[in-house]
Image (tube, rainbow, N blue to C red):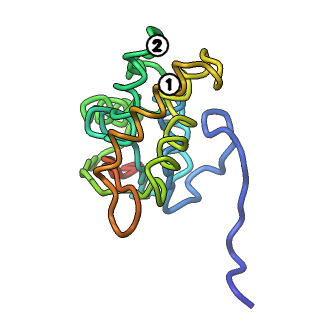
């Protein structure tokens, strides 16, 4: 009963041995931005796609368009000197935030029919501002910057208080809703 032709495997796409020309679709949600060598990784994936097979992935737009990251990071940077914007040239969540880099990388890997579409939405980060503020300090570049500060320090308390005040106006009947911006990227394998 159910689907019997599905197999789940876990591995690093840069090095994982995939059977040649077997797959019709490769999909990634927020994973491809972490490759050390994205051209090599995408070339390997393209080799696993059947003729005209599709690659689809979702990645973040620039930090400035992602309120859920920019708002906390701006506040943290007032208190902690090491709170820097992530390097978009290095592997990390925002390494494909610029469409030109995505297009160049996929073209070098041999993909064609590359399309990049914006998808923007609001995301729920908690029912109350205090909960959302705590959650937002536990991930991404904000968490990296805060990791140098003791949770009991006055800096951490000040950051939480200021962040809570900054996001309180975004309370809706659904909770604290902050803006998120992604790219939906599609490409085709032209190989015969």
* Residue 80 drawn at (x, y percent): 46, 13
Judging depth in this view, the residue of 72 and 25 nearest the camera is 72
52, above or below 61, in the image: below
Of residues 60 and 20, the one drawn nearer to the viewer in this rendering: 60
Query: 156 above or below 192?
Result: above
Between disc 2 and disc 1, whose residue precedes?
2
From the image, tell me which residue sits under label 1. Answer: 91
Relative to 107, 175 lies left or right = right
Give SS at disc 2: loop
Instruction: Tell me the CA gap for discs 2 and 1.
Output: 23 Å
The answer to which image quadrant residue 14 occupies is top right
The location of residue 70, given as percent across then percent down, is 34, 33
Query: Farthest residue in the bottom direction?
Result: 1
* Residue drawn at (39%, 32%) of the image: 162
Circle 1 — which element? loop
The quarter in which the N terminus is drawn is: bottom right
Residue depicted at 40% across the width and 35% down the height:
163
**Is residue 71 shown to the viewer in this render?**
yes
Q: Visible in this render: residue 36?
A: no
> Nearest the camera: 128 or 64?
128
Eye-nearest disc, 2 or 1: 2
Q: Residue at x 39, y 27 (%)?
A: 73
Residue matched to label 2: 80
Q: Is residue 34 above or below residue 191?
A: above
Q: Is residue 155 left or right of residue 12?
A: left
| Pick the front one: 165 or 114 | 165
Residue 65, x across and y down, in percent: 26, 39
């Amino acid at each position: 009963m159910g689907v019997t032709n599905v197999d789940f495997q876990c591995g690093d796409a840069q090095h994982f041995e995939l059977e040649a020309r077997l797959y019709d679709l490769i999909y990634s949600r927020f994973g491809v931005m972490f490759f050390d060598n994205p051209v090599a990784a995408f070339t390997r994936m393209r080799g696993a796609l059947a003729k005209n097979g599709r690659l689809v992935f979702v990645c973040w737009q620039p930090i400035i368009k992602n309120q859920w990251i920019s708002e906390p990071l701006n506040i943290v940077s007032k208190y902690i000197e090491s709170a820097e914007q992530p390097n978009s040239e290095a592997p990390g969540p925002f390494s494909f935030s610029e469409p030109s880099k995505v297009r160049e990388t996929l073209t070098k890997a041999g993909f064609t029919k590359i399309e990049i579409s914006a998808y923007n939405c609001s995301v729920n980060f908690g029912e109350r501002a205090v909960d959302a503020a705590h959650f937002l300090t536990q991930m991404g570049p904000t968490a990296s910057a805060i990791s140098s500060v003791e949770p009991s320090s006055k800096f951490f308390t000040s950051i939480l208080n200021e962040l809570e005040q900054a996001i309180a106006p975004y309370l809706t009947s659904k909770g604290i809703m902050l803006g998120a911006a992604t790219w939906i990227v599609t490409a085709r394998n032209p190989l015969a």
